[in-house]
Image (cartoon, grey):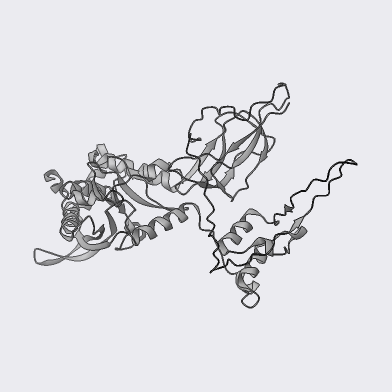
Amino acid sequence: MAQLRKFPLPDVGEGLTEAEILSWHVAPGDTVVVNQTIVEIETAKAAVELPCPYAGVVTELLAEVGCTVDVGTPIITIDLDPDGSSDQAASSDEAMPSLVGYGPKPGTVTRRTRKIAPATSADPAPVAPEPAVFELAVSEPAGAESVEREPVVLVPLAKPPVRKLAKDLGVDLRALTGSGPDGVITREDVWAAQAGPTGAVPAATRERERRVPVRGVRKATAAAMATSAFTAPHVTEFLTVDVTPMMELRARLTANRAFRDVKVTPLAFAAKAVCLAARRTPDVNASWDEAAGEIVYFDYVHLGIAAATPRGLVVPKIRDADVMGLRELAVALEALTATAREGRTAPEDLVGGTITITNVGVFGVDTGTPILNPGESAILALGAIRDMPWVVDGAVVPRKVCQLALSFDHRVVDGQQGSQFLADVGALLADPALAITY
C-alpha cells in the first residue's frame, strides 16, 4: 500500500524562519533517491539546494515557485512504496535519513507568531468584514441525534503571489469579489481595493510600473542596514592616496611565477592593508555588545567583502584573513566573488564578520559613505583608481590616485583611532614596502 511521506521545509541554519521556492528540480511522477537535489530555495542569506530525504516517487508538490514558505511547512509529498510491495504503512514519525548538505536540525524549527493587538473598551477595534460561511449539508440516519456543526469559513480564491500582494498592501481578501475565472481574485482586484473608489490608479499607468516584492536577500539587507544606520553613530573620514607604487608592484607580480595563475587586484592589496593596519588599531576590529554592556575585541580578522549579486548585496567572509599572505588573499577573493555572483554562498559564510571592505571603484565610483554591517565597528570603501595630476618633489605629474572612505562606530572608535587606521591603510597602499614594518 502507498506510504506517503511529507517533507517539511527545514531550517538551513542561523535561525531563519522562512524561504522562497526558487525552482523545483522534480515533478509529480518522478522517481527520486535519497540526497538527490529536489528544490532550490532562497533564504534571507543565500540560495540553497535541498536534498531529498526519502527514496520513492513524487506524488505532489505542495508549494509553488515564487511562494514564501515558513520553516516546518510541508513542501513535497513522496510515496515510499509506489509499487505497493509493502503491506505495512510507514510510521509518520519515522526518522529521516542522514542527508548531504542542508537538512533539518533538531530543535531549530520555529514558526512566526501572529501578533494580535488586544481590544480595549476605550479604543474599540475596527469591525472587519464578516467572512463568508456556509453550513455543511450532511445526511444522517433517521432517528439520529441532531449534531451542532461549526460553520466552515471559505478561503478566498487567490494565487499565492496575489495573497502576498494583499498582505503587503493591507487588503482583506475576504472583502473582495474576484474578477478572474471562477471568481479568482486577481492582482488588479487587490490594487483597485487598495486605491479605493476615488483614488484608483488608471490601468494604463499600472502597465508602465514594475513592482517587485521585498523578500529574500533584499529584505534582509534592508532590515540590517536600517538597524545599523539608526543604532550605531556613524562617522566617515576620507583620504586620497597616490597608489602608483602599488600598481607598479601589481604589474611586477603578474609576471612573477608564483602569481602567474592568480588574479591580483587592488582589492587584494586593500585587504592585506586592512589586516595589517588593524593590528595597530584593534578598535576597528571590535564589536559593541549592547546587551552585555561590553566591547568585544577580536584577535582574528574575519574580513567581509561586499559583493553585488543578481539577488542583491551580500557580504561573504574570508575567515582568518589576517594570517593570509597576498597570494592567499587574492585566491580567496576570486573564489568568494565568483561564488557570490552565482548565488551559491553558504549561509554560514555570510555571518560572523569583524570588519568589511566595499569596493565601489569597480563601478567607476570615487568614494562614498558606507553603512556599517551590524555587529562590526568599521567598513572601508575603496574607490576607483584614476590617472590624476599629483605633486611629486615640487612638480605636477600624472599618478594613479584612489580615494578611501572609512565609516566607523563612534561608540567604539574615537576620531584618533579611526584617523590612524585610515592613514595606515593609505600608507600601505601608497608604499607596499611598508608592510614589512607592520
Snapshot quadrant of residue 63 = top right
Residue at image position (34%, 61%) is 229
In this view, the residue in front, 155 or 262, is 155
Query: Left or right: 102 with respect to 174?
Result: left
Q: Quadrant of residue 124?
A: bottom right
Residue 380 position within the rendered picture, expressed as x and y whole percent measured from the top left? 27, 55
Residue 207 can be seen, yes or no: no
Q: Residue furthest bottom?
A: 198
Residue 383 position within the rendered picture, expressed as x and y whole percent measured from the top left: 29, 59
Q: Total marks drawn?
A: 0
> Is residue 220 left or right of 141 when viewed as pictured?
left
Percent coordinates x, y for residue 189 in the rendering: 67, 66
Q: Quadrant of the C terminus?
A: top left
Looking at the rendering, which quadrant does residue 331 occupy? Answer: top left
User: Given the current orientation, which residue lies at the most extreme left position?
Assistant: 393
Which sits in the foreground, 136 or 200?
136
Q: x and y percent of residue 355 in the render?
A: 28, 50
Nearest the viewer among 332 and 393 is 332
Between 176 and 250, the residue placed more toward the observer is 176
- Looking at the image, the residue that sits furthest to the right is 142
Q: Quadrant of the N terminus?
A: top right
Q: Is residue 316 visible?
A: yes
In this rendering, is residue 208 above or below 360?
A: below
**Residue drawn at (65%, 63%), measured in percent from left and top?**
187
